Amino acid sequence: MSAPTFPIMAPASPLAAPITGLMWVTLLLGLGVFLLVTVAVLYFVRRYRHRGAAGEPPQVFGNAPEELIWLGAATLILVLLFGLSVRVAAQSSPPTDAGTPEITVTARQWFWQARYPGGAVSAGEIHIPAGRRLLLDLESGDVIHDFWPYRLGRKIDVIPGQHNRLWIQADRPGVYQGACAEYCGTQHAWMRFVVVAQTPANYRAWLARTALPAASPAAETQDGARLYARLGCPVCHAMSQASGVGKVGPDLTHFGSRSLLAGGVLSNTPQHLRRWLINPDAVKPGTLMPHYPLTATEVASLTRYLEALK
Ligand SMILES: [Cu+2]
C-alpha cells in the first residue's frame, strides 16, 4: 500500500474532493492577502522611512473611502468563503433523509469497530464496496471521538448517546488511511483505521465470509482456545467461537485476517501479537487491555490460536 504523503491533498472520493478544493481556495486567498500586506509593509517602510527631518510628521485621521474599501474587501472574502463552505458542506454531508445506514461504526478507547448487514464485524478495518456512496452510522462506547477517513469523506464527531451519520465513498478499490481526529485520551494518536474499498463482488464475498464464525480450533490451537477462556479474555472480547460478548475490546472472531493491531500501533503479525500479549501497556501505554503475567508457552499458544482465526 503506498499512501500519499499528504492524504488530505489527494482526495479519492467525490465527497472529499470539494473539501480539498476549498482548502486550496482558502490557502491561496490567504497567501494573496499575506503577499499584498508584506509588499505594502516593505514599500511603506522604505517610502516613509525617517530621513532626518525634525518634528512629528503630519497626522492623518480617518479616510472614509479607504476604510470602506478595506472593510468591503475583507467582507467580500469572508462572504465568498462562507458561501463556498456551505456548498462544500452540502456536497459532502448526507441530508437527514439519506436513508438507512448500512454500516455501524463504533469508537472506543482506542480502536474502531464496524458492524455490517448479515452480522459481519471488523475492527481496525472498515470494508466498503468501491464506487458507491454508503451511509455510516457512528456511535461511541465511551468518550467523544471523531471519525476521519481523510481521502474518502469529511470528518464527524462520534458522541456517546448520539448517532451521527456520514457518507463515505471510494472511487476505486484500495486501502485508505483514517484516524480519530478528536483528542480522546492518552492513546488518541494510535486510534487509526484503514478503509478497505473492494470491488462489489469482492465486498459481497468478504461480507459472507466474515459473517461466518471462524473455523473451530484445530488440534494445534486447542491449548490456546482453552487458555483464552480460562484467562477471561471473553469478558472484554466478543468472538463467535468462544463464549462471551465483551465489548470493551475489539471483536476477535476473524482476528487472523485483519491487518492492524490495537488501533494501528502495530501491524498484525505473530511477532507483534506476541509483543502485545506479553505486555500491552509497553506497546500502547495507558491501553485498557490488562497486562497478564503469561509464560512464553502461554503467549505462543494464544498467538497460534488467535492468528489462526481467519
Ligand atoms: Cu478517539
Image (cartoon, grey):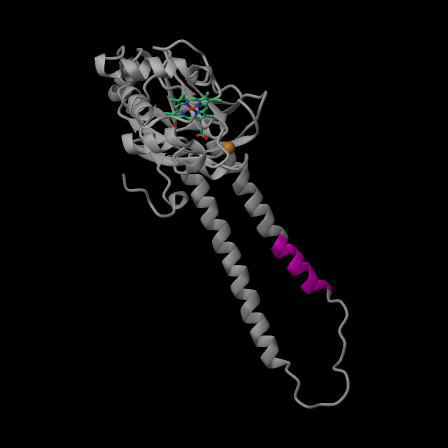
- Residue 17 visible in the shown view: yes
Residue 74 lies, with reference to residue 36, above or below; the image says above
Res 253 → quadrant: top left
Inspect the magenta stretch and tell me whether residue 61 lies in it: no
Residue 45 lies, with reference to residue 190, above or below; the image says below
Indicate the position of residue 134 as horizontal and vertical percent values. 40, 23
Give the camera-side residue of 277 and 135. Answer: 277
Q: How many marks?
A: 0
Res 142 → quadrant: top right
Q: Which residues are magenta?
A: 64-74
Indicate the position of residue 13 as horizontal and vertical percent values. 37, 35
Q: Is residue 67 left or right of residue 36?
A: right
Inspect the magenta stretch and tell me whether residue 73 lies in it: yes
Q: Is residue 78 left or right of residue 240?
A: right
Give the camera-side residue of 119 and 267. Answer: 267
Give the camera-side residue of 284 and 86. Answer: 284
Residue placed at 46% from the left, 41% from the top?
19
Indicate the position of residue 207 as horizontal and vertical percent values. 31, 16
Residue placed at 42% from the left, 22% from the top?
250
Q: Is residue 97 left or right of residue 261?
A: right
- Residue 170 visible in the shown view: no
Q: Quadrant of the C terminus?
A: top left
Work out which residue is located at the far left of the displayed protein and give it.
219
Residue placed at 27% from the left, 38% from the top?
1
Give the camera-side residue of 172 and 235. Answer: 235
Q: Is residue 213 left or right of residue 107?
A: left
Indicate the position of residue 48 as horizontal and vertical percent values. 64, 81
Q: Is the stretch drawn in magenta largely helix, strand or loop?
A: helix
